Image (cartoon, helix red, strand yellow):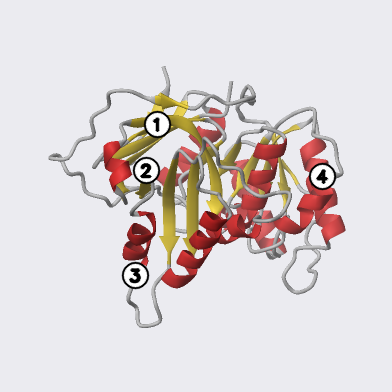
Amino acid sequence: MRAVIRQTSDVSSKKKNPKKKSQITKVKTVKNKKRAIRLDALSSGDLIEVVAPGSYSPEENLQKGIKELQALGYEVSSDPSTLQPHLNFLSNTDHERFRFLKKALMSSKNKGVWCLRGGYGAIRLLPFLDKMKAPSKPKLLIGLSDVTSLHIYVTQKWGWPTLHAPLLDRLALKKLSKANLGELQSALEDANYVAEFKDLEPLNSSARKRKSIKSSVIGGNLMVLTSTLGTPYQIKTEGKILFIEEVSERAYRIDRCLQQLKQAGIFKGVQAVVFGDMTACDEPNKENYLDETLKSFFADAKFPVFRGVETGHGEIQRPLFFNTETHISCGDSARMLVYSAFK
């Protein structure tokens, strides 16, 4: 039996509406062309390799993050030369950041590759990844924000599942609640783990009319998703559930990125769009026009659009597997079940 991890008062401030219930009558299934790759779950004593593919983070944060992972029972490895600030916004040169990333991905010893920080820089490594062979041993890539570039690459190019979850420097700064950290460890170690995201808000009529969806999630940070357009690494969403989150962007900037995605055909064939945290998206006058912007943009969309997945740049960053089986029960009180990547 799978263990469903539900939202609790510690990880959700949303109120239930008992008068509104979605009716589940059938599930629309989108078949994957390739058989999904399954990984071995992590356990105490397993090795996790820490990399810094994006912006610089102080050495102190790296060491604190390593101690946090060790406290969870894992062995941890990181190259002593990982952090050598470059260009004032990168953790190291492209060559060195890729060298450490390749070493971690190609290793037969570790079970996970955890990214230290987001910021910017991962997209600069994608051409280097093209020149290497796919690793013979898949392992779990962990991170969010700028790591979106890597999530897209390894899910699309190699077919791996990945985990959209807190960056290591967030653990280092002890910004995760006890419940949040506990769920994260369950996601890493329990093959029966199922994340339940409840009370999702429907943003268009399709989200209320559609019954259910069975597919898999892909996506990440909106600005990073947009940066893939017109490149060999452009996100492919046909038959997928597209997850989007963002931080510190005003409504018109959000709309601009969505327009770019639309005009690039990214929404064609998508099964659904689900929004995670859209954090600190207020206007200079403290007004917030995001909700009406999203509802206006997706009003006529033929696919369901929801909001309320608690992960992204918010205080709570729940783990969300990409490229694994996912079910959405639509309606006014929608929920999404995201299954584990493990065997």
State which tag comes first along the sequence, 3 or 1. Answer: 1
- The residue tagged with tag 4: helix, strand or loop? helix
The circle drawn on residue 8 is none
Q: Identify the residue at image location x=71%, y=47%.
A: 50
Q: CA distance from mark 2 to mark 1?
A: 9 Å
- The residue tagged with tag 1: helix, strand or loop? strand
Q: Identify the residue at image location x=27%, y=38%.
A: 209
Q: Are marks 2 and 3 in contact (CB under 8 Å)?
A: no
Q: In the rendering, at what x and y percent does residue 331 appear? A: 26, 39
**Closer to the eye: label 2 or 3:** 2
Q: CA distance from mark 3 to mark 1?
A: 29 Å
In this figure, which residue is indicated by the disc labeled 3?
289
Looking at numbered disc 2 in the image, what kind of residue is underneath it?
Pro
The circle drawn on residue 304 is 2
State which tag comes first along the sequence, 4 or 1. Answer: 4
Q: In which quadrant is the C terminus drawn?
A: top right
In this figure, which residue is indicated by the disc labeled 1?
213
Q: CA distance from mark 3 to mark 4?
A: 40 Å
Is residue 237 placed above or below 327 in the rendered structure?
below
Q: Are marks 4 and 1 in contact (CB under 8 Å)?
A: no
Q: Are marks 2 and 1 in contact (CB under 8 Å)?
A: yes
Q: CA distance from mark 2 to mark 3?
A: 21 Å
Q: CA distance from mark 4 to mark 2?
A: 34 Å
